[in-house]
Amino acid sequence: MNDAQRCPACGASNRCSLADPRTAANACWCFSVSIDAQVIEALPAEQRNKACLCPACAKVLEQLEAAKPASER
Ligand SMILES: [Zn+2]
């Protein structure tokens, strides 16, 4: 796992599809959610726009759950 695949806040995999060449053609989970600007602003400036946050740190787990088809919940 390289740095682009790691959440800058907690170090876990950010599951960014664009950071992995095998899934780079897929839309990332972050395209379908809205991340609170306060979450981004809480990051150190040098970590912004480098790597994606993980869904937990971006506080979008509820949005991702809501976007899933009922059969996958
Ligand atoms: Zn995280």
Image (cartoon, helix red, strand yellow):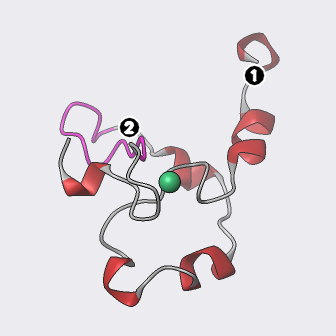
* Name of the residue lying farthest toward the top: 71
Which disc number belongs to residue 22? none
Quadrant of the frame with the C terminus:
top right
Left/right of residue 18 with respect to residue 31 in the rendered view: left
In the image shown, does 12 or 63 lie closer to the viewer? 12
- Residue segment shown in magenta: 14-25
Residue extending farthest to the front is: 10
Residue lying at 18% horizontally and 39% vertically, measured from the top left: 21
Q: Earlier in the sequence, mark 2 or mark 1?
A: 2
Q: Position of residue 56 (x, y in %)?
A: 61, 49
**Looking at the picture, how far across and down is residue 62, in whole percent?**
78, 44
Residue that carries the numbered disc 1 in the rendered image: 69
Residue 26 shows which numbered tag?
2
Q: Residue at x 41, y 45 (%)?
A: 12
Q: Secondary structure at mark 2?
A: loop
Tell me how far mark 2 sits from mark 1, CA to CA.
Answer: 18 Å
- For badge 1, the amino acid type reads Pro
Which is more toward the observer, 25 or 64? 64
Residue found at x 57% / y 48%: 55
Majority SS type along the magenta span? loop
